[in-house]
Amino acid sequence: MPVKKLRAVAAGGNLSAGFREETLSRAAKQGADFIGCDAGTTDSGPFYLGSGQARGAREVTKFHTGLILREALQAGIPAIFGSVGHAGGRPHLLWMLDIVRELARENHWHFKLAGIDSEQDQEKLAQAFLAGEIVALDPAPPLDENSIRAAERIVAMMGVEPIQCALRMGAQVVIAGRSSDVALYAALPLLRGIPRSVAYHAGKILECGSACVSQRYYPDCMVAEMDEDGFTIEAPNPEMRCTEQSVASHSLYENGDPYQLVESGGTLDTSGAGYQAVSDRAVRVTGARWRPADVYTVKLEGAALAGYRAVSFAGIRDPLVLRQLDSFLDGLRRVIERKVSDSPGLKPDQYTLQWRVYGRNGTLGPLEPETQDIGHEVGLLIDVVAPTQELAAAILAIAFHTGLHHPIPEHVGLISNFAFPFSPPGMNAGPVYRFCANHVWKLKDPCAPFALTMEDL
């Protein structure tokens, strides 16, 4: 029998970013049917997916995970974590499961734990590609069976179904690999009979915790009470307020179209949604519609090794150099390329050398609309990517030392152009990854690609 109301608590927008302990405790004690927390995103680029490293520090992640588990276990409600370790690959899943087991041992907690693996077998994906089951999104990098096999790691973004499977099997704590932010908040409400349009729209607003308030002072929790007609969203922190504008505007976040929000299995249409303040801190949301998709798909995200990076940062304050900065950098590049071709013997198409000029257009590059004269100084970021770390460091050393004394017509004798804030001036930044898949995979069974394990702690 469908429930009349369901109360969901989002602990925060990103597990490693944290939340206020007292806010979570208040939200849980006011009554909650489950606590969710997203732990990942592609906003940070492909490094974490490619490397298998987690973005958040282990101790910080453990601390906030422990707070969520404590409240959920005390209340006897599920705790659901999605996109763990930031990228949701197998190394991230194993890392997070280890943290949860450690917390259980230290606190003498006992519960049924589910782990859902979203990392994919690349040979199976290659065969799916050849069968026409993988379709490019826009934009998408070139993809074929060979690039699939060569990828460092590919994950599929699960919808609600694998999480629901774990909950049906009695899991009180669900640790999911890469998953839709919305899915981790919609899975249980759908099982309890909340309409799909309500569950998905509430999940969309909950996904980033306190991001939907009018003024977010710091990361914190959010609560949505769902029923058959809509949901009411309210910040459990009394210092924060949800307003009609702040809640409605969250549909713009990470979406090209705020009215058509595509998920696995369908599209949430918010064009008819209404947002009505019911207090000075809470908003009632109704009117969204759900359109089922003809074909069920999951998004694929992949990362491939692109090389190794070395960087240097230098300040330029010489007005003579700043007056002719473009020609200075163009000439500098030509000299660097000639030196690198001599030793270590690489052609320009075998590595990349990029500048970012902060104080002019370092953020937007050629898209920068403010084209007036630059100020009294700029910061020059020198970025080198090469096939090995040793080569990247060698090319960078050539670049920053050549730039240090690169002449301009007005100079007489040896002049220094750069001021380095660090010693050594160059820093190895390690492996560089690129996204190699931004595609969808057509599925007959939404749970098939996601291996589920259960254990009793």
Image (cartoon, rainbow, N blue to C red):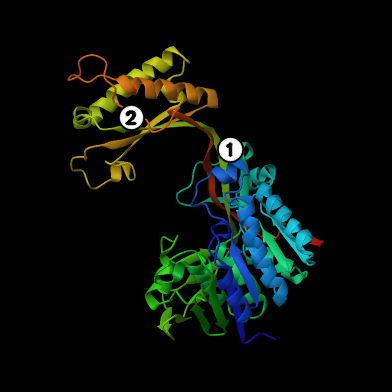
Q: Nearer the viewer, residue 315 or 246?
A: 315
Q: Amino acid at mark 1?
A: Ser
Residue 363: quadrant of the picture: top left
Visible in this render: residue 425? yes
Residue 155 falls left or right of residue 325: right
Q: Position of residue 260 (x, y in %)?
A: 45, 67
Q: Is residue 264 above or below residue 47?
A: below
Residue 2: quadrant of the picture: bottom right
Mark 1, other Cα within 10 Å: few <14 / some 14–19 / many ≥20: some
Q: Which residue is mark 2?
A: 419
Q: Position of residue 373 (x, y in %)?
A: 18, 40
Q: Is residue 345 above or below residue 82?
A: above
Q: Earlier in the sequence, mark 2 or mark 1?
A: 1
Question: Which circle marks residue 147 in the picture?
Answer: 1
Residue at 37% from the left image edge and 16% from the top image edge:
338
Q: Position of residue 278 (x, y in %)?
A: 44, 86
